[in-house]
Amino acid sequence: MTNLNRPARLNRTLLALIGLALVAAGGFALATSLGWLALLDRTAPLAPGDDRPPTWVLYVTVVVAVALGLLFLRWLAAQAMRRPKTRTWRLEDDPSHGVTKLSAVAAVAPFESEIAAYPQVRSADATLSGPQDRPTLLVTVTAEPGTDLTALREHIVDDGVARLKQALDLAELPSVIEFRIAAEAAVRVI
């Protein structure tokens, strides 16, 4: 089964490792400065010599630290975004008679509702991404345990995707369908 967001797990792992390393380094520095750890002499200077670095070194250090902090925040924020970017389609034969705009989210909303109403389907989420002349349909379906996924996929492609292609007047609509199996509800003993 493919995942539509393959790098997310690696990214989260790397963020967690970097965060743990920074927390450990901060904890080590704090414990050493408070005298809880005697591995280093807390009265010794951090760098040899008494001279302060040139002012430009301090400015470069601050700029690099802020830039790295912003990059890490952007990287962290990107983890929350799972959906590929969608676009607004412009449907026009003759611009002098007006322009019709169609949001990709609005275009797939009926498709999502139709798929979610299929037997053995708990939920469906669809995204229509890519340019208008070469769109790609990404579908995530949460199915009940024991569902025949092959038959469900054929039903989605033969009925739902075919109807969406017809509604959007597309000759082809490449589709990626990701299935998730819903967890069975735990039995409560009262």
Image: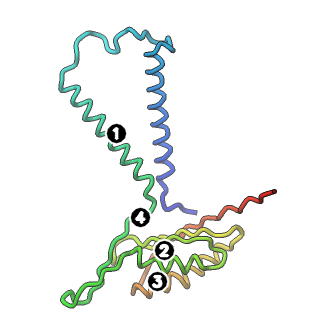
Residue 35, image x, y percentages: 47, 12
Tell me which residue sits at (34%, 79%) in the image: 102
- Asked if residue 160 lies left or right of residue 52, the reply is right
- As shown in the figure, which amino acid type bears the numbered disc 1? Gly
Label 3 secondary element: helix
**Cβ atoms under marks 1 and 3 closer than 8 Å:** no
Gap in angstroms between the C-alphas marked 1 and 4: 25 Å
**Cβ atoms under marks 1 and 2 closer than 8 Å:** no
Q: Which residue is mark 2?
A: 175
Residue 150, image x, y percentages: 64, 75
Q: Which residue is mark 3?
A: 164
Tell me which residue sits at (37%, 43%) in the image: 72
Circle 2 Cα neighbour tier, 10 Å, few/some/many (<14 / 14–19 / ≥20) = some
Which label lies toward us, 1 or 4?
Answer: 1
- Asked if residue 78 lies left or right of residue 151, the reply is left
- As shown in the figure, which amino acid type bears the numbered disc 2? Ser
Disc assigned to residue 69: 1
Which label lies toward us, 2 or 3?
Answer: 3
Look at the image and tell me in which quarter the C terminus lies.
bottom right
Q: Which residue is mark 4?
A: 84
Disc assigned to residue 149: none
Gap in angstroms between the C-alphas marked 1 and 2: 38 Å
Gap in angstroms between the C-alphas marked 1 and 3: 44 Å
Among numbered discs 4 and 3, the one appearing first in the sequence: 4
Among numbered discs 1 and 2, the one appearing first in the sequence: 1
- As shown in the figure, which amino acid type bears the numbered disc 3? Leu
Among numbered discs 1 and 3, the one appearing first in the sequence: 1
Label 1 secondary element: helix
Circle 3 Cα neighbour tier, 10 Å, few/some/many (<14 / 14–19 / ≥20) = some
- Asked if residue 170 lies left or right of residue 118, the reply is left
Gap in angstroms between the C-alphas marked 2 and 3: 11 Å
